[in-house]
Amino acid sequence: MTIFKSNIYSFMGASFLCVCTLTSCGGSSSNGSSGDQVSSTAVLSSSSSSSAVASSSSSSSILSPSSAPASSASSQSSLSSSNGAAITAKQAASKMGKGFNLGQMFDNTQHPRTFAAAKAKIDAYYAQGFRNVRIPITWTEKIDGTTLVNSTTVGDVNRSHPRLVVISQIIDYALSLQDMYVVINAHHESALKDNNRAAVLERLWQDIADIYRDRNHRLLFEVLNEPHLSNGSAMDPAKVRAMTSKSYTKIRAVDAERIILIGGNQWFGAQEMAITWPNLNDVGGGQDQYLMATFHHYNPWTFNGDNQGDYADNWTDNDISSPMDTMLNWSKSVGNGMPVYIGEWGSGWGSRYQTFSCNNIRLFYSKLDAKFASVKGIPTAVWDDSGWFKIFDFATYTFTNNLSQCIGGTCEWDGAERFNTGCL
């Protein structure tokens, strides 16, 4: 999502290692936003990092067995020291299953941008069988006054930005978990889209591909999230294709087997795919087996959207299945069998209620993945922003409702009525 979210931010490091206590990697303000300051840190050259980390008492919390070690954003050694065997997009789609978003962490400033916070959320979902995590990242827009690029008109990644160090720690930790897939993207890049800065996106993905060139192929690249303009209107499909093509070419120059995700030209609605991609000439001509299509499923928005009134809407199974079928029909024709991924879905219940108890929403969550997407071979990632679309709560590091269980297919209700008082 885009205009329905609040902020943006990012952070990055190159051949340097940032070592800090988990509590000093980001500060929270009274309104719950988190800064990018890194206090009590030691910045070490990658060649001396191993011995220095081992002897650093201040890094003990990071180096505990249950935590991921700090790492350079562009280091050639990490938890995933090799990018491993190639994984085709179809193979990945068959393994990714149900997943979740680290929403409102690295795309804006709503939540603490720390390894500790991200790890807690990843661990909680992983324990319930979720096997893919999407990490929205904003690179070219300011978050707490800084961007992840040196120049917003060039797109060159600031490889010594501290926020990227944390992002890389999170990527490496997630990849260290058995069968876990990670999707990173370019998320809230407003000026880039408004000004059609294809060269900026091209340079951005050239650098990202280089920084993470050694990571396991379970790390996937989503080129550009929801390519709408600042006024909400769609980007010109031809511009989206041209922009994506340049980025695709740069990624392929670094790694011919990295899975790349492409989508529509506005809100990533299923119907946008045929408009944006009437052919695949700009991205491998339909012969690239490491290409995946993505879309977002908030259908019907009158039910799932934030600030849409009550949640007693009488949605139907067709509301769930129709967008999936639209994408699969494109895949079977133009897409040449390209697998499909739902990168976002969910209901913005928190825009109306302080606590959750709506059975109608529980029913929707119980059906979308377990009864429809998984049956159709479509992996998913629920939009959990720990805000209006909340499932996981960063204040307590726990699930504050049972929607994560509902996604598995079954969960307890409050009473027997679909439209209970919690939906009114």
Image (cartoon, rainbow, N blue to C red):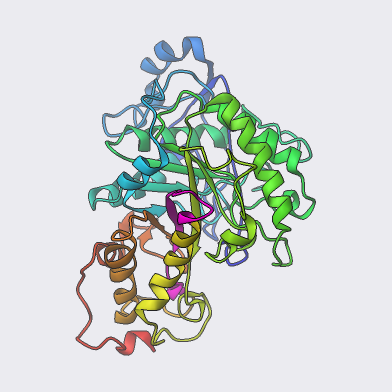
Return the residue found at the far front: 333
| Above or below for 410 versus 82 | below
Number of marks in the rendered image: 0
Q: Is residue 128 above or below residue 415?
A: above
Position of the N terminus by quadrant: bottom right
- Name the one closer to the observer, 303 or 245: 245
- Magenta residues (range): 331-350
Q: Give me the residue at 71% from left, 67% from top.
A: 233
Is 419 within the magenta? no
Q: Position of residue 38 (x, y in %)?
A: 55, 35
Q: Is residue 110 left or right of residue 237?
A: left
Query: Residue at the location (71% across, 59% down)?
Result: 235
Q: Residue at x 40, y 21 (%)?
A: 82
Camera-side residue of 147 and 156: 156
Residue 348 inside the magenta-drawn segment: yes
Q: Is residue 134 above or below residue 418?
A: above
State whether residue 251 appears in this view: yes
Instruction: Please state the horizontal and vertical placement of residue 214, each as a whole percent of the image.
Output: 46, 23
Nearest the eye: 266 or 127: 266
Position of the C terminus by quadrant = bottom left
Residue 244 percent location from the top left of the image: 65, 44
* Image quarter of residue 162: top right
Would you say residue 385 is visible in this rendering? no
Residue 126 in picture, x, y percent from top left: 28, 47
Determine whether, in the image, residue 6 is placed left or right of residue 387.
right
216 left or right of 137 in image = left
In the visual, does 330 lie left or right of 278?
left
